[in-house]
């Protein structure tokens, strides 16, 4: 019988494990220490647990940490890793070094059910949720793990569509008994699921990024079908009513498509709908994907759009394109791997 994975369990879940094995209550915190601070790859290596405890645990559990199955490196230092989840299904994890920052971009689902028209992951359709252990394994088993300074949940899948596992992973990352990371070094990016966003905001102190891509309902719905069920105006109303405090940031991701969503009308409407929100817009140049009807803008067009938004008083930055030589668009690599196994 396959053993259950213990990595990715919260302290209260580890307490359930130790209680079921009739081990002393303090054992749960010892196991958490090994899993999230000391990095024991095996239960047998948790040497301050009694021998009896290790034998009992090993009967039913394994840590579940797995290294990436392949990697590809860009000339600019960005790397993409594939982590195998199960028979032939992979998720992508990106490592992005940038001066004094080193960021890992985590995936939360196999594929995605949101169907955004410009996204390769969306074309894969939904194949399943990752567990908290699967999500965190991309962080812990990344070869560059010791040098990481930031975490973004911006890889494959929609975090609010797998909210329970995402919140568990964030609890482990930010708890004193877990990795002890500051939530201000973690950003979760969502397309905005109206009935879940409040639970996310109340359940963590991590930064929020919302994928906007157009301020016009009809145009956004063409790009992102989710707009119909979860109108961005409702998402903005929730954000406006929430107290983010001084430390927590909200930002809007805006993929710029050549000649589509970067007109003066877009500038005016963005300024109107974001009025009253202390935020930043991150402009992202569209990375072309096979068979797409959209094309990438030039740097001059990006800069002109940025300047127009800045002139309206919106802090706007252009996110540097990274890893273009290694299939930078999210979902391209795992789609190639998926197709190999068909
Ligand atoms: S952009 Fe994000 S939410 Fe949309 S289909 Fe791709 S992975 Fe899913």
Image: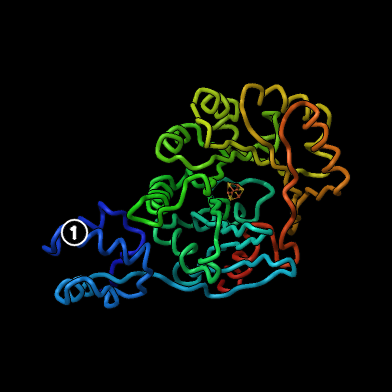
- Foreground of the two, 163 or 320: 320
Q: Is residue 239 above or below residue 37?
A: above
Left or right of residue 75: residue 136: left
Residue under the image location 23 percent in, 71 percent down: 48
Left or right of residue 220: residue 207: left
- Foreground of the two, 214 or 150: 150
Residue under the image location 78 percent in, 32 percent down: 310
Q: Is residue 76 above or below residue 111?
A: below
Quarter placement of the C terminus: bottom right
Looking at the rendered structure, the number of numbered marks drawn on it comes to: 1
Specify the farthest residue to the front.
100
Residue 11 figure quarter:
bottom left
- Foreground of the two, 83 or 112: 83
Relative image position of residue 262 (x, y in whole percent): 80, 36
Relative image position of residue 243 (x, y in whole percent): 49, 27
Residue 32 figure quarter:
bottom left
**In terms of secondary structure, where does tag 1 sit?**
loop
Residue under the image location 69 percent in, 42 percent down: 282
Q: Which residue is mark 1?
A: 26
Relative image position of residue 298 (x, y in whole percent): 86, 49
Relative image position of residue 257 (x, y in whole percent): 78, 44
Quarter placement of the N terminus: bottom left
Residue under the image location 55 percent in, 64 percent down: 147
- Foreground of the two, 28 or 3: 28
């Amino acid at each position: 019988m396959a053993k259950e994975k213990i990595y990715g369990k919260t302290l209260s879940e580890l307490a359930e494990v130790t209680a079921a094995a009739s081990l002393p209550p303090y054992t749960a915190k010892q196991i958490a220490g090994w899993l999230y601070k000391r990095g024991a790859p095996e239960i047998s290596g948790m040497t301050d647990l009694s021998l009896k405890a290790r034998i009992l645990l090993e009967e039913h559990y394994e840590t579940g940490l797995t290294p990436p199955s392949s990697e590809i490196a860009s000339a600019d230092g960005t790397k993409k890793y594939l982590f195998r989840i199960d028979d032939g299904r992979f998720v992508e994890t990106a490592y992005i070094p940038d001066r004094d920052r080193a960021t890992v971009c985590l995936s939360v689902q196999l594929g995605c059910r949101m169907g955004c028209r410009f996204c390769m992951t969306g074309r894969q359709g939904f194949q399943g949720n990752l567990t908290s252990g699967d999500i965190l394994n991309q962080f812990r088993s990344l070869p560059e793990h010791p040098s990481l300074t930031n975490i973004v949940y911006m890889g494959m899948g929609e975090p609010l569509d797998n909210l329970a596992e995402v919140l568990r992973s964030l609890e482990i990352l930010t708890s004193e008994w877990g990795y002890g990371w500051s939530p201000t070094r973690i950003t979760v990016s969502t397309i905005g699921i109206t009935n879940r966003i409040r639970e996310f905001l109340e359940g963590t102190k991590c930064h929020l990024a919302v994928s906007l891509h157009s301020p016009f309902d009809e145009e956004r719905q063409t790009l992102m079908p989710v707009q119909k069920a979860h109108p961005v105006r409702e998402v903005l109303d929730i954000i406006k009513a929430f107290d983010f405090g001084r430390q927590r940031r909200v930002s809007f991701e805006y993929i710029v498509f050549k000649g589509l969503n970067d007109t003066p009308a877009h500038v005016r409407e963005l300024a109107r709908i974001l009025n009253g929100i202390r935020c930043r817009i991150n402009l992202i140049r569209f990375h072309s994907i096979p068979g797409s009807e959209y094309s990438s803008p030039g740097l001059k067009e990006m800069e002109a759009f940025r300047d127009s938004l800045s002139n309206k008083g919106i802090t706007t930055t252009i996110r540097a394109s990274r890893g273009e030589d290694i299939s930078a668009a999210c979902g391209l690599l795992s789609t190639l791997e998926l197709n190999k196994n068909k």
